[in-house]
Amino acid sequence: MDFSLSEEQEILRKNIIRFAREVLNEGAAQRDREETFSRELWQKCAEIGLQGLPVPEEYGGSGLDPVSCAVALEAFGYGCHDGGLVFSLCAHLLSCVVPLWKFGNEEQKRRYLPPLCDGRMVGVHAMSEPGSGSDAFSLRTKANPDGRGFRINGTKTFISNGPVADLVIVFALTDQKKGYYGGVTAFLVESGSPGFQASRKFEKMGLRTAPLGELVFEDVFVDADAVLAGVGAGSTIFTHAMDWERALLFASHAGTMERLLDQAVEYARTRVQFGQPIGKFQAVSHPIADMKVRLEAARLLAYKAAWLLDRGKNLAIEAAAAKLFISESFVKGAFDTVQIHGGYGYMVEYEVERVLRDAVASTIYSGTSGMQRNIIARWLGL
Ligand SMILES: Cc1cc2nc3c(=O)[nH]c(=O)nc-3n(C[C@H](O)[C@H](O)[C@H](O)COP(=O)(O)OP(=O)(O)OC[C@H]3O[C@@H](n4cnc5c(N)ncnc54)[C@H](O)[C@@H]3O)c2cc1C
């Protein structure tokens, strides 16, 4: 077993960290305050290939294997202080670009992957509905056959990048009786389609630079060639997208956990109270030691899941374990870092309160912590 990064991966990591620090961080607090999604920074990320990391070069991507993608996204989460931008980009990449690349036919891939990789298009994944979140397959959005295609009706909610979407992978019922087992279909819908509306942008606790909203489909007509991987393939596509997301989006969070650790160590070394650096008090140093342990475990879980992806193996339990552990460790580490900074930690200027606000959502999206425990328990035969 070899835990070292290859020379290419080391270079990739360094380049992304340098890029993020030089280009993406300035003004992050202001964008957070004003809830601004920066299309300009999105474009800059595309210029270094972030939006198409694993996509083959012939479709405009960078052609990286999943473990190298984990390295890249971990570096992105480490170097980029704009957690909303990291999240937006990962959601686009892992829940729209990847399923399109994995399940699209040649024409769909040639048409959409280049603009999704080069920054011209923002992609979204629309599954959740007002009445169906954890129980995603109790969805109500329907796609009924109509001539050469389908008519889609329904409302999707909490959709990352929804307000700025150009291309939507939307999941709809095509056979209510079959449901999960072949009754759900994924469709590619362009945002300009008549009847489609990005109707509502939500105000959120964190990830404020990542726009999130509701999408309404009112008699939206799509041609039969907008079906992704065949009628009834929706559950396979959804599950596969979740595997990628749980492994690799959470690799980016491991990167941010490392930045928090650096910040906590630095502060504990330099802040003096009672005549000594606060890091000399075990009440301060032990939570930091625990952050280090959780970071190491988080990284191993994310890399193992990415390694399984690379080998095309079932990773349901490993992806759920990575997602569960990293998200909960991320929240705990962010909370502890705020505490270690005392009153300063509560101030916007120190940037740790923002990470805490951003981190909380990680225990909810890609399936809540409760649902990850359910998945793990089910695979254990419980
Ligand atoms: C920032 C953010 C981005 C998101 N992006 C997207 C996106 O791009 N696309 C998309 O489709 N969706 C997206 N979502 C939606 C997300 O997937 C759902 O919020 C999530 O699956 C939970 O669904 P819910 O909010 O309806 O909560 P519910 O399902 O109503 O759950 C409420 C609570 O009940 C618990 N619970 C429910 N059922 C069970 C059970 N069987 N066992 C144990 N506990 C249970 C949950 O764990 C949770 O604590 C996003 C959400 C957030 C916060």
Image (spheres, helix red, strand yellow):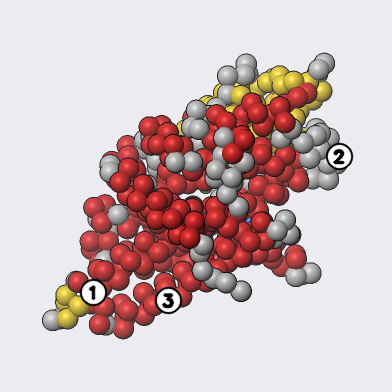
Residue indicated by mark 2: 177
Return the residue nearer the eye: 195 or 325: 325
- In percent of width and height, residue 164 lies at 49, 30
Earlier residue among tags 3 and 2:
2
> Which residue corresponds to the image point at 65% horizontal and 34% vertical from the top-left?
169
> Which residue corresponds to the image point at 65% horizontal and 64% vertical from the top-left?
318
Q: What element carries label 2?
A: loop
Tell which tag, 1 or 3, sits nearer the viewer: 1
Residue indicated by mark 1: 269
Q: In this view, does 185 lie above or below 336?
A: above
- Label 1 – label 2 distance at C-alpha: 62 Å
Q: What element carries label 3?
A: helix
Q: Is residue 226 above or below residue 382?
A: above
Earlier residue among tags 1 and 3:
1
Q: In this image, 74 relative to 1: left or right?
A: left
Q: Is residue 15 above or below residue 143?
A: below
> Which residue corresponds to the image point at 57% horizontal and 31% vertical from the top-left?
114
- What crowding class fits label 1: few (fewer than 14 Cα within 10 Å), some (14-19), or many (20 or more)? some
- Label 1 – label 3 distance at C-alpha: 17 Å
Residue indicated by mark 3: 290
- In percent of width and height, residue 21 lies at 32, 49
Tell which tag, 1 or 2, sits nearer the viewer: 1
Q: How many numbered marks are there?
A: 3
Q: What element carries label 1?
A: helix
> Which residue corresponds to the image point at 32% horizontal and 42% vertical from the top-left?
23
Return the residue nearer the eye: 366 or 25: 25
- What crowding class fits label 2: few (fewer than 14 Cα within 10 Å), some (14-19), or many (20 or more)? few
- In percent of width and height, residue 41 lies at 38, 36
- What crowding class fits label 3: few (fewer than 14 Cα within 10 Å), some (14-19), or many (20 or more)? some
Is residue 163 visible in the rendered structure shown here? no
